[in-house]
Structure formats: structure tokens, C-alpha cells
Amino acid sequence: MRVVNRGRFITLEGMEGAGKTSRLADLQAFLQQRGKTVLATREPGGTALGEKLRALLLAPEHGPMTPLTELLLMFAARSEHVQQVILPALDAGQWVLCDRYVDASYAYQGAGRGLGNAPVAALEALLPSQAHPDLTLLLDLPVESGLARAKRRGAADRFEQETSGFHQRVREAYLSRARQRPQRYCLIDAALSPFEVSAAIERAVGRLL
Ligand code: TMP
């Protein structure tokens, strides 16, 4: 049941190196200045167990994990995150900003790994319906420039090490999901300056205030 003063659930998605994490910090400050209590979190992760699963999922030494194992671990972390963190925060009236969520599983495991949408949709159906984002900000960037930016941050994780073909499939899946869901998604050009990207995000989020 939707509580009257329930908070808002905003997810950030995008390519590697698109700057999600820094823009999420800017958005958190923007909302706090407007009197909102904000919870910033991430996937995979966001709980003690989820952060352990994240470390397993991102570590390059687990390279040959099967795509289904990868998807199930993403959803194991997500189930914990939704029940222990996201829903309690929304019910308490907080605004939840989440760095990646279910759309990432469609893009990375469904398209990138080639599992298709069906197994992702089957797992998504197990999540409570209240755990659906109000707004998804897609920070889009050409694959090569995103990977080059990510590379400058340090050693590549298991996903960053993937081929540009993999990342191209991820990007196309995100763009196609955004086109099919214009009411929930806001597409943002992450090649703009950080200031311009944050301004575009604030305009989109302003509609929820
Ligand atoms: P990032 O949040 O720092 O970008 O790193 C998380 C990585 O995990 C990123 O490469 C995308 C990947 N990922 C998936 O493959 N599926 C998912 O469902 C989620 C949440 C993340």
C-alpha cells in the first residue's frame, strides 16, 4: 500500500564512466537544500551482504562466472537491499537515490551477457511492487569515451574489462528501454560538462518536488 507521505525513488543508470556517482552526490545536496531527507545507495551493494556480493561480482578473478549465476547474485543483493533499506526509507518519507537498479540487469545481463529479458523479468516480478522507481536518469555516453574515463579511475573491474561489443549492447539496451518508457526515464547527455549534467538532472527531478 502506498503511504501518503512516501518518499520518492530515483535511480541513476548509464554507461561505465558516465559520472553517475558524482552526479548522484550533487543531486543529494540539491535535494537536501530543499529540505528532503535523502538516502544515497547503490547496486550491487547497499547492505553489508550486498557489498560482499558486489565485491564477488566485480572482482576480475571471478571472470568466467556464468551469466545466470551473475544475474542471480545481482538479484540476491537486490532483494536484501529492497527489503532492508529501500522500502523502509521510502515508507519513512525519505528520498532514495540509487546508483543502478533493475534496469542495469536488463542492460548488462539481459543484453550484454545475452540472457534476454525473460529471466530478468521473472526475477523482477518477485520484488514488491512498491520498489518501482518514480524516475530513472539515464546518463548516456558513447562507449569508447566512457571506457576511457573509467580507465583513468584505476584498475578495470570485471565489467569494465568486457569488450566494446558488450558495452555497445548495454548502451543500446538502455536507450531502447528509455525510448519504451518515456514517462519514467529521462535521457541525459553525459558528454556535457558536469555542471550541465547536474543542471539537467535537477530540471528532471524538479518535476517531482
Ligand atoms: P558501478 O555501479 O560502479 O558502475 O559498478 C557496478 C557494475 O555492476 C557495473 O559494471 C554494472 C554492473 N551491474 C550489472 O551488471 N547488473 C546489475 O544489475 C547492476 C546493478 C550492476
Image: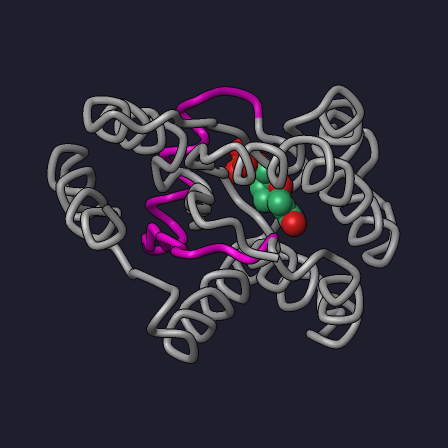
Q: Is residue 114 left or right of residue 204?
A: right
Instruction: Point out residue 205 in the picture as x, y percentages from the top left corner.
Output: 25, 48
Q: Position of residue 89 (x, y in %)?
A: 55, 32
Residue 133 lies in the magenta-colored region:
yes
Asked if residue 186 lies left or right of residue 58, the reply is left
Q: Foreground residue, 130 or 43?
A: 130
Which image quadrant is residue 147 in?
top left
193 vs 72, left or right, is left
Front residue of 86/151: it is 86
Q: Which quadrant does the N terminus fall into?
A: bottom right
- Regarding ligand 1, which quadrant of the image does it lie in? top right
Residue 160 visible in the shown view? no
Vertical order, 26 against 7 (above or below): above
Q: Residue at x 72, y 63 (%)?
A: 124
* Side of 87 relative to 118 (left or right): left
Hey, which quadrant is residue 188 in on the image?
A: bottom left
Kindly identify the residue that appears in the image at 47 percent across and 64 percent down: 174
The span picked out in magenta is 131-155
